[in-house]
């Protein structure tokens, strides 16, 4: 097995003090592999809320500090935690159709989104096979809110960060099998990489130039405000308040 699937990299900085403290405080190293994957996956899915960071290629420790992320940045953190726990994992790169983000990205800034947006999921080696993990992107509170907003839709749905054949019961919980929440929006398949760093070094990130500057300084904050509003619309009665502050 490729030893690089356990390696620390510029993005996967798992010896960072905050990462090690999280793992030690929660006693994750004492778990078996199934539960190591489960706790890392569930932490990234639900305790790191859905939101938009400054760039796809930020370090995993920065994602942890932000407390929110999207497919690529939450994937950085999940891979970091898995490798810190001794679990083999690798990066699978794609693009997704921009339509998938419509609604999460409000219409007045949707012009910024590329037609095909860089996307990724994490592949984890467990019980002798590679398992695809993509269902961690949307936190439970946000996904619950979207399901409530479109309660009449039970099957195929695309938008608001979702692309699934079953909105009423998407495959997002860790049970030892593949998990997905945006799979149906995939356009290009770039294949496998040892780490996010290798992928972004080859493919770059979603935006460059003035669009990147506008996104980082203004537009992502507006998007996060919209995501917070969507999350809170159906969850205020349960006292679940959004965290992404930017």
Image: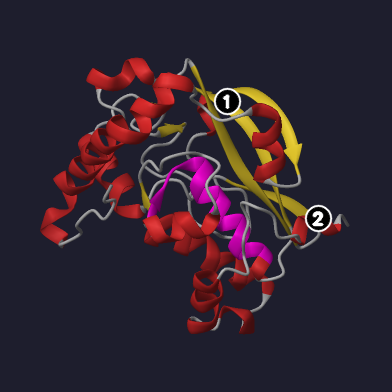
Give x and y (percent) for residue 2: 86, 54
Which badge, 2 or 1, comes first in the chain's sequence? 2
Q: Which labelled disc corresponds to residue 4?
A: 2
Bounds of the magenta segment = 68-83
Give x and y (percent) for residue 161: 39, 34
Residue 16, picture quadrant = bottom right
Magenta segment: does it hold 84? no
Q: Residue at x 27, y 40 (%)?
A: 224
Q: Which labelled disc corresponds to residue 240?
A: none
Query: Colour mode?
Result: secondary structure
Up-down relation of residue 92 to residue 29 (above or below): above
| Residue 9 visible at all | yes
Classify mark 1: helix, strand or loop. Answer: strand
229 lies left or right of 85: left
Q: Residue at x 26, y 40 (%)?
A: 227
Magenta segment: does it hold 69? yes
Residue 176, picture quadrant = bottom right
Q: Nearer the viewer, residue 116 or 236?
A: 116
Classify mark 2: helix, strand or loop. Answer: helix
| Residue 151 visible at all | no
193 lies left or right of 224: right
Residue 127, picture quadrant = bottom right
Q: Residues within 10 Å of mark 2 (few under 14, many from 20)?
A: some
Q: Residues within 10 Å of mark 1 (few under 14, many from 20)?
A: some
Give x and y (percent) for residue 64: 45, 60
15 lies left or right of 143: right
Up-down relation of residue 197 to residue 45 (above or below): above
Dominant SS of magenta comes to helix
Give x and y (percent) for residue 74: 49, 50
Q: Which residue is mark 1?
A: 95
Q: CA distance from mark 2 to mark 1?
A: 24 Å
């Amino acid at each position: 097995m490729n030893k690089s699937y356990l390696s620390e990299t510029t993005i996967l900085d798992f010896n960072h003090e905050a990462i090690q403290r999280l793992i030690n405080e929660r006693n994750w190293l004492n778990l078996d592999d199934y539960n190591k994957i489960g706790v890392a996956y569930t932490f990234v899915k639900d305790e790191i809320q859905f939101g938009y960071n400054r760039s796809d290629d930020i370090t995993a420790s920065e994602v942890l500090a932000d407390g929110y992320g999207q497919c690529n940045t939450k994937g950085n953190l999940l891979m970091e935690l898995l490798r810190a726990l001794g679990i083999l994992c690798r990066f699978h790169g794609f693009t997704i159709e921009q339509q998938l983000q419509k609604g999460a990205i409000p219409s007045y800034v949707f012009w910024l989104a590329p037609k095909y947006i860089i996307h990724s999921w994490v592949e984890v080696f467990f019980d002798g096979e590679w398992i695809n993990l993509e269902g961690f992107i949307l936190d439970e509170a946000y996904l619950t809110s979207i399901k409530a907003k479109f309660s009449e839709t039970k099957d195929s749905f695309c938008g608001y960060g979702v692309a699934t054949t079953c909105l009423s019961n998407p495959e997002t919980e860790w049970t030892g099998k593949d998990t997905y929440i945006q799979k149906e929006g995939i356009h290009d398949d770039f294949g496998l990489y040892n780490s996010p760093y290798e992928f972004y070094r080859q493919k770059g990130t979603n935006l460059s130039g003035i669009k990147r500057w506008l996104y980082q300084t203004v537009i992502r904050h507006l998007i996060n405000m919209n995501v917070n509003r969507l999350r809170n619309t159906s969850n205020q009665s349960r006292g679940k308040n959004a965290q992404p502050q930017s």
